[in-house]
Image (tube, rainbow, N blue to C red):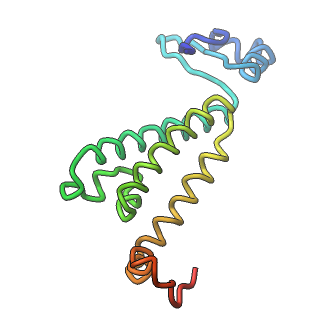
């Protein structure tokens, strides 16, 4: 696990005097600037920071969902699902499958340095939730499978 001090430490005056060294360190991993009052500032590539923020948000959202799924279905409201409130319209088995897939993909995204597959996964499941939110379509999907679906337009 990385620490806050991973990278190179600089003083504020280094931004003017040795700006190339600061930028090189930031490009390589990160550069830490200790302000005169002791505040630590981190400079790192924006893409890396955005990935970390997205992964952290997805993980926090998954924790909210997991906590909601621990309660009986009758006691859950959409707000209890946190940012994944849209999952609440899906069958419980699908909700649990979504949670497993999101956690797996969060780990892959963190290790691969790419959030694209995680974004795609969430978007695919959001589309499924939209399907489940349509009352008529939900009735058709949960009806006896012995009868063919009628007039379903996706």
Report whether 56 appears left or right of 90: right
Q: Quadrant of residue 60?
A: top left
Vertical arrangement, residue 40 with respect to residue 70, above or below: above
Viewer-proximal residue among 50 and 96: 96
| Residue 79 percent across, percent down from the top left | 29, 55
Q: Residue at x 58, y 79 (%)?
A: 154
Vertical arrangement, residue 139 with respect to residue 102, above or below: below
Viewer-proximal residue among 18 and 44: 44
| Residue 73 percent across, percent down from the top left | 24, 56
| Residue 23 percent across, percent down from the top left | 76, 21
Return the residue found at the far bottom.
Answer: 151
Q: Residue at x 59, y 22 (%)?
A: 42
| Residue 143 percent across, percent down from the top left | 39, 78
Vertical arrangement, residue 153 with respect to residue 34, above or below: below
Return the residue found at the far front.
Answer: 146
Q: Count the marks.
A: 0
Report whether 37 appears left or right of 16: left
Q: Residue at x 42, y 42 (%)?
A: 62
Q: Residue at x 60, y 50 (%)?
A: 119
Query: Quadrant where the N terminus lies?
Result: top right
Viewer-proximal residue among 46 and 66: 66
């Amino acid at each position: 696990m990385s620490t806050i001090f991973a990278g190179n430490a600089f003083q504020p005056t280094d931004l003017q005097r040795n700006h190339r060294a600061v930028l090189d360190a930031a490009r390589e991993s990160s550069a830490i600037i200790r302000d005169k009052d002791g505040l630590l500032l981190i400079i790192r590539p924006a893409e890396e920071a955005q990935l970390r923020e997205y992964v952290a948000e997805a993980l926090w959202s998954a924790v909210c969902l997991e906590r909601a799924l621990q309660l009986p279905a009758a006691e859950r409201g959409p707000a209890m699902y946190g940012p994944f409130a849209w999952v609440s319209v899906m069958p419980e088995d699908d909700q649990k499958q979504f949670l497993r897939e999101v956690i797996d993909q969060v780990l892959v995204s963190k290790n691969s340095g790419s959030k694209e597959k995680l974004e795609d996964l969430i978007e695919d499941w959001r589309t499924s939730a939209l399907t489940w939110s349509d009352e008529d379509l939900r009735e058709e999907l949960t009806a006896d499978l012995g009868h063919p679906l009628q007039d379903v337009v996706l």
